[in-house]
Amino acid sequence: MTYNKEIYKKLFGIVTPIAFQYLMASLVTASDAFMLGFLDQDSLSASSLAGQIAFVFSLFYFAFVNGMNVLAAQYWGKGDRKTAGEVFALTMRYSLLAGLVFTLGTAIFPEQIMRFFTADAKLIAVGGAYLRTVSLSYLLTGFTQAYFGMMKVCDRAKLSSLIGSLSVVVNIILNAFLIFGIGCFPKMGISGAALATVLARVFETAAVLIAVLRGQCPALDIGLMLHSDDRQLRRDYWKYTVPLMINQVGWGGGVTMYSVIMGHLGSDAVAANSIASIVRSMIASLCWGISAGVGIILGGMLGRNELEEAKQAGGSFVRFSILIGAASGIVILALTPLILHIIHLEPQAQHYLKYMMLMAAYYIIGNSLNSTVIGGIFPAGGDTKFGMICDVITLWFVVVPLGMIGAFVLKLPVLAVAFILTLDEFVKLPAVYRHYVKYRWVRNITKSDPLQPVSPAD
């Protein structure tokens, strides 16, 4: 009992700042939707669709950062700070490269990108203006997110949360000033929301650099970032990162296809889906924080060869994630009347939103469990391939095809299509459970230790 208390005390020491940072980040999206909703529904819908580019970019940097966490958490737990720093330098290299690609793409081809999400000429024009303005933020985000990931590994989660949260406050304040033209600021509408995002990332980058100069977090070895001679470490990094990236891109591409499908069902469907997704993301912040915290804690335990203890802790975390998911669903149901009261949409969109909130309430239960197991427990021991296979098959061979058939062939009602698109978390649950009890994730993957999984419990 005392051991469990210590484990959960450590978990919440990591989870609280991470979850708060996720929550604050989702507040930016919420403030965009809330403020742009006062302008017109087209601005709200266009920003939602254009925001999918940031989501797609996040799939890449999350893969790089999570790949770092798989290795760096174990090396840090083992006490090998030098190798953990080398893993960080590799992560920064690829995170910045991805950010540069997205920055150039959105700056040069914004309208062409928007055409992928919608055929509505007005949404394409408005969303294109947003993407062109926000383009620089992707490069800056690549830098700060790599640093935030390393801060979590080296027990500086509170610092990353503080910087990220202050950036959110700056973003929300600038949103109000630049969207509506308060005081001496020009009224820029949706472009103002994009500019506020860029300025917030500039603030975030400056804050990270100040923290580094003050010695509050590890310094980046620029030489190692540009070139590393440790081929074995690079192979290890990509061994765990590539499946994570395929998983992220496969899962995220599927989720993006949800927006594509809804985007072709009309502005009402897009607006309602946008609000429901924002609320779900805000409530899911705790679930995602738990997933990150579980991965770091179990990774450290496995790096110290505490295999049986990690196995027991994993079971405890699984049960805990189910309780958190159920509680999160209840919170969404409780918030639904308030959301419907304060969000002003067209009557048809308001009707869609009511039932999409109900769908979000049960969806989050499966999301909580799967994010903890697939995103936290399995990668802690280097088991990154299963999540890749599971998510890609579930989304691209089951849910996305069913959603497209329902929307474009059978011409089902919007809410019926939305229901189909919430099935992914539950379709994969049986496979996730069967894989979990094999305990292939219970292993030490640092260089000097054997990669031997423990036997499953009787």
Image (cartoon, grey):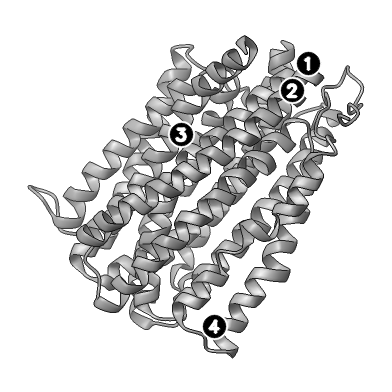
Location of mark 4 (residue): 407
On screen, residue 247 above or below 116: above
Q: Which residue is mark 1?
A: 306
Q: Residue at x 52, y 76 (%)?
A: 417
The earlier-in-sequence mark between 1 and 4 is 1
- Give the image location of residue 63, x and y in percent: 65, 44
Residue 225 in the figure: left or right of residue 169: right
Q: Earlier in the sequence, mark 4 or mark 3?
A: 3
Asked which secondary structure carries label 2, the reply is helix
Circle 1/circle 2 CB separation < 8 Å: yes
In which quadrant of the rendered view does residue 187 lie?
Answer: bottom left
Label 4, label 2: how far apart the Cα atoms are: 45 Å
- Mark 2 and mark 3: Cα distance apart in space: 22 Å
Q: Looking at the image, is 325 positioned above or below residue 264?
A: above
- In what element is the residue under mark 4? helix
Residue 321 % position (x, y): 58, 38
Q: Which mark is residue 310?
A: 2
Does residue 454 appear left or right of residue 99 in this picture?
Answer: right
Q: Give how far apart the Cα atoms at labels 1 and 2 are.
A: 6 Å
Amino acid type of the residue tagged 2 in the rendering: Ala
Say which residue label 3 marks.
19
Kindly indicate whether the residue at mark 3 contacts the one at mark 1 (C-beta within 8 angstroms): no
In the rendered image, residue 165, in percent from the top left (x then y), is placed at 36, 32
